[in-house]
Image (spheres, grey):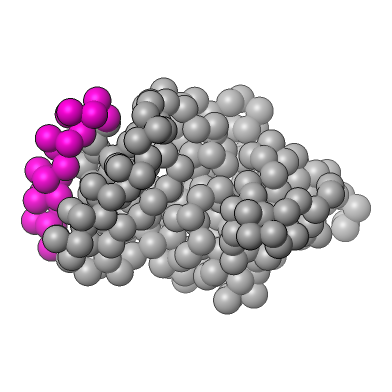
Amino acid sequence: MSDIPDPAGNVARRLPPFPDWKDHALFVDFDGTLVPIVERPQDVRLSDSTRQLLLRVIRASDGAVAVLSGRALESLAGHLQGLPLALSGSHGLERLLPDGRSVMAEDGAPAEALERAFAGLKPFARSEGLLLEHKPGAVALHYRNRPDRAEICQAAVARVAEAQELRVLHGNMVSEAALAGVDKGHALRGFLAEAPFANRIPIMVGDDTTDEDGFRAAQELGGFGVRIGQAGTVARFQVPRMEDALSWLSASLEAEPERR
């Protein structure tokens, strides 16, 4: 695969070598990485081929696969039913281990701040015809149906977040006022302290700015990140499209027998 320039004029990194899944763990974003971005988040569907790919990685890694998402854990779990993997929702606030145990991270702001943020954004969302979502760890304003209003939406969320001492997360067609102190890097580190992830080398794959904390954590722990798209990133490797990342995962499994 050829190198691609990012917006800053840098050259994006080539695909990484194939990992040995017996000593690596996969951490992967959901929207934009396993499923395409759609206008209404509730309308996404995990394709049969991607479901089968995840099952193959789960088997090859002895279950060391986790999906890290900004979605609420309940929503994420609903789209991944039947897959024996770990889940993290709300940008690291909620975690569900493969054995069914759930973990809620300690956050850096009271839940009442989210209530006030939701109330503050509700009139704006209604007037713009946008979806406003109240999740356990964040209030998310989705503007996938109004991409022309991105800057205005981002500014509205930033104002409310600052007033409530919440952090701002700008993702793919969504801006969030989120609780401080937790992120996808926090979730990745938490999983690596538990079986079946302990003592494995982490790989983080994602497409969004909210995945940067995960890339950073994976690389600090001896692994690497793979960023989808052409945006600037801390990830060591980068691919143009979601399909390229999935193809790389599939090819890594085909390479497994060569090692044995």
At 46% from the left edge and 51% from the top edge, which residue is drawn?
68
Q: Within the magenta stretch, is there residue 120?
A: yes
The answer to whether residue 200 is seen in the rendering is no
At 67% from the left edge and 40% from the top edge, which residue is drawn?
241
Instruction: Determine the image quadrant of residue 55.
Output: top right
Q: Is residue 20 left or right of residue 156?
A: right
Pick out the residue farthest to the right. Answer: 258
Q: Is residue 224 left or right of residue 207?
A: right
Classify 39 as above or below 197: above
- The percent coordinates of residue 222 (x first, y second) are 64, 75
Q: Within the magenta stretch, is there residue 6?
A: no
The answer to whether residue 173 is seen in the rendering is yes
In this view, the residue in front, 120 or 47, is 120
- The percent coordinates of residue 92 (x first, y second) are 37, 58
Classify 162 as above or below 50: below
Give the magenta-colored segment's residue range: 110-130
Q: Is residue 3 left or right of residue 55?
A: right
In this view, the residue in front, 86 or 91, is 91
Classify 26 as above or below 55: below
- The percent coordinates of residue 5 (x first, y second) are 73, 54
Mostly what secondary structure, the magenta segment? helix
Identify the image quadrant of the C terminus: bottom right
- The percent coordinates of residue 218 (x first, y second) are 57, 68
